[in-house]
């Protein structure tokens, strides 16, 4: 799920950047530091959409660096248990398959793949229905439901399922090609 | 120093509690304010330090799950406690999360399968289940499992610092042939290694993959194994993620099939090192070591010139890999037998499930010295129990009959010395007199070797050439 929220961060800046473009420097550094990072509470910071406030700078003794409290608006992405996501399959093996929804890694174990889909090894490992009409393989898109999430410093990992109504393959590159 | 003038209108809201925000946004029916609200006012604005959300919040988030599912699982646990699809027990974990119910458990039970995913652990019941599924799938595809060692089995590597002046030409070859897809010499980037593939290995893999699901299993580290896999399997059609390295072994200095998600009854192993397969000797096809580089020969105590120095190599067409490929073909043929030609029914699969490739391998091996009756002379101390001697056991595995006494039915005397009583008896009675390498060679080459090539010389330790 995406959220548009306000966050706050203390930014440290070297005095050489002080001048008419100080604000630009701070914003550029903020984007570089924050976009693409991940935190347990907020999820992935996708993009900064605006800077609301830059507070009074505080000179750090001994270093000359100045700390500015910055309040900014950003779009974050955070998967939740129960949420439905579209993801791209990245790897298929006899345990199940891995998929990615943006920066989020999701594993769907074969317990959570419909029983009528069986694993086929070979050059392109896949899960296929007995009639061959539906096939999950690398690169195809699936709609899945998150049943567990785990957040680390740099990544969010989820357990997903496609064993429910309206879940499963939404596009199959193999069939399209 | 103030930047407020440049800033937009000061937002009055302080750092919003994200979970509270979510609750409001998603309209969760819950009026109580989070008890840990105060703690959430971040003293330190560094978001990265805050990895774990407080439990009260997680609880709320979990409540978002549709009630239908919650009811469903309640029904299941109460009415069908024996259902195999219900947690607990959890079948396995990935990153500490149950792969079936998503629950986070911190206990580190089960077997790690780091080569499939770095944070994957499976419990034994799940491993059995996966092996069962795999068995069925493989049999349907009419395939067995082949475990392939790397060093000295399908290739030989040497550290660059150990490359001798006489071998220097190989580095140039590795460089100049970079564009050649069929080359067999590689300098591994960043590893300071020169790697020579064993002759025939490309054809070997191409053929073996039709009959086997192939795993790499090496005691070397993962980075090396992956680098070699890239060389052996540039199109990624042979190994997939089946690349097992030292980090995956569950016992020190031992290779085990416990980290292979396949049935032992389908497994054949090709390895030059016997002792690491203590628990799976019956699956093992022992490989004659491929020593290409001088440093490799030295490590194993050989002083003669290496293949690299003499610019020679094993035969491509009838070298060891070609010979072993034929053994694999026979084993595969004998295992599937009449089933090879037909479409398999469920009943056929059941029938095949009870077969064991180890028995097939045993049969093939027993044909090698079939009809030979061997007496040993000065090969092992006469005080030792003959039946316990490795060479005695080996000869028997190759189908020979071993005896301690000479008689008319004896065909071969294996000795270290031409002058022993039994050796002289052999010569007088027109029996073959050979050195022990005759048996070892038969073992490696999977056929009875010409006795003339294994004459006893004055220096009995010379390897046959
Ligand atoms: Mg080896
Ligand atoms: Zn579970």
Image (cartoon, grey):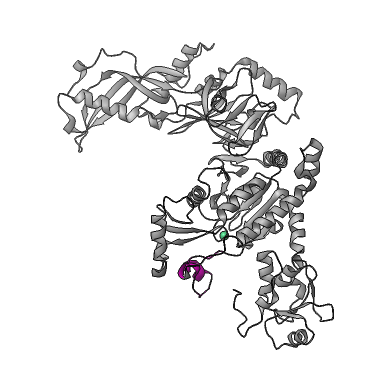
Residue B298 inside the magenta-drawn segment: yes
Q: Nearer the viewer, residue B45 or B304?
A: B304
Left or right: A53, with B141 as reference point: left
Q: How many marks?
A: 0
Task: Give above or below for B309 relative to A12.
Answer: below
Residue B147 inside the magenta-drawn segment: no
Which residue is painted at 27% across and 14% down in the image?
B10
Ligand 1: quadrant of the figure:
bottom right
Q: Is residue A45 visible?
A: yes
* Magenta span of residues: B290-309
Q: Position of residue B177 (x, y in %)?
A: 42, 54
Q: Is residue B279 visible?
A: no
Q: Quadrant of residue A28?
A: top left
Left or right: B201, with B365 as reference point: left
Q: Position of residue B394 (x, y in %)?
A: 72, 68
Left or right: B433, with A123 as reference point: right
Q: Position of residue B387 (x, y in %)?
A: 77, 72
Task: Give above or below for A18 relative to B406.
Answer: above
Q: Position of residue B425 (x, y in %)?
A: 78, 86
Q: Nearer the viewer, residue B337 or B374?
A: B337
Q: Nearer the viewer, residue A23 or B358?
A: B358
Left or right: B126, with A174 as reference point: right
- Extreme residue in the front direction: B317
Which residue is painted at 34% across and 28% down in the image?
A34
Which residue is painted at 52% across and 55% down in the image?
B220
């Amino acid at each position: 799920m995406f959220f548009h929220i306000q966050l706050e961060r203390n930014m440290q800046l070297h005095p050489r950047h002080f001048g008419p473009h100080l604000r630009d420097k701070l914003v550029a550094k903020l984007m570089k530091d924050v976009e693409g990072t991940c935190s347990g509470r907020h999820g992935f910071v996708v993009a900064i959409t605006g800077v609301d406030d830059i507070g009074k700078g505080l000179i750090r003794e001994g270093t000359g660096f100045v700390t500015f409290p910055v309040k900014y608006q950003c779009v974050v992405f955070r998967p939740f248990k129960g949420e439905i996501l579209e993801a791209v399959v990245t790897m298929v093996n006899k345990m199940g398959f891995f998929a990615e929804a943006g920066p989020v890694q999701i594993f769907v174990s074969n317990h959570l793949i419909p029983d009528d889909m069986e694993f086929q090894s070979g050059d392109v490992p896949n899960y296929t229905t007995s009639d061959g009409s539906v096939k999950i393989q690398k690169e195809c898109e699936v709609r899945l439901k998150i049943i567990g999430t785990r957040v680390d410093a740099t990544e969010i990992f989820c357990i997903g399922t496609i064993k429910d109504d309206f879940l499963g393959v939404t596009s199959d590159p193999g069939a399209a090609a | 120093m103030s930047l407020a003038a440049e800033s937009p209108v000061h937002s009055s809201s302080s750092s919003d509690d994200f979970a509270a925000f979510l609750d409001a946004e998603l309209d969760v029916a819950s009026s109580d304010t989070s008890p840990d609200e105060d703690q959430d006012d971040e003293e330190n604005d560094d978001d990265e330090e805050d990895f774990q959300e407080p439990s009260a919040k997680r609880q709320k988030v979990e409540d978002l799950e549709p009630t239908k599912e919650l009811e469903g699982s309640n029904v299941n646990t109460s009415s069908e406690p024996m259902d195999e699809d219900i947690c607990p027990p959890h079948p396995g974990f990935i990153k500490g999360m149950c792969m079936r119910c998503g629950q986070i458990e911190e206990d580190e039970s089960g077997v790690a399968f780091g080569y499939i995913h770095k944070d994957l652990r499976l419990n034994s019941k799940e491993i059995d289940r996966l092996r069962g599924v795999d068995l069925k799938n493989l049999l349907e595809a009419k395939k067995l499992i082949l475990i392939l060692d790397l060093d000295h089995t399908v290739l030989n590597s040497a550290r660059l610092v150990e490359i001798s002046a006489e071998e220097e030409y190989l580095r140039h070859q590795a460089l100049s042939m970079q564009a050649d897809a069929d080359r067999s010499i590689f300098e591994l980037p960043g590893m300071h290694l020169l790697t020579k593939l064993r002759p025939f290995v490309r054809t070997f893999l191409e053929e073996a993959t039709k009959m086997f699901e192939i795993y790499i299993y090496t005691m070397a580290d993962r980075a090396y194994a992956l680098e070699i896999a890239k060389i052996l399997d540039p199109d990624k059609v042979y190994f997939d993620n089946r690349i097992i390295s030292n980090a995956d072994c569950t016992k020190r200095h031992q290779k085990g099939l416990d980290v292979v998600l396949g049935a032992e009854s389908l497994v054949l192993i090709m390895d030059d090192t016997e002792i690491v397969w203590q628990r799976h000797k019956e699956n093992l096809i022992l490989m004659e070591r491929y020593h290409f580089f001088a440093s490799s020969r030295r490590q194993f105590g050989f002083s003669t010139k290496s293949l690299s120095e003499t610019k020679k190599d094993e035969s491509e067409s009838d070298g060891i890999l070609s010979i072993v490929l034929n053994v694999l073909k026979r084993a595969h043929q004998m295992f599937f037998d009449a089933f090879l030609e037909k479409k398999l029914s469920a009943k056929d699969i059941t029938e095949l499930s009870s077969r064991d490739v180890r028995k097939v391998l045993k049969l093939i091996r027993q044909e090698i010295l079939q009809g030979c009756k061997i007496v040993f002379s000065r090969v092992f101390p006469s005080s030792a129990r003959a039946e316990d001697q490795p060479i005695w056991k080996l000869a028997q595995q190759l189908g020979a009959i071993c005896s301690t006494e000479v008689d008319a039915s004896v065909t071969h005397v294996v000795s270290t010395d031409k002058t022993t009583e039994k050796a002289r008896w052999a010569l007088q009675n027109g029996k073959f007199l050979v050195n022990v390498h005759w048996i070892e060679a038969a073992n490696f080459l999977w056929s009875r070797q010409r006795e003339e090539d294994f004459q006893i010389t004055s220096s009995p330790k010379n390897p046959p050439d």
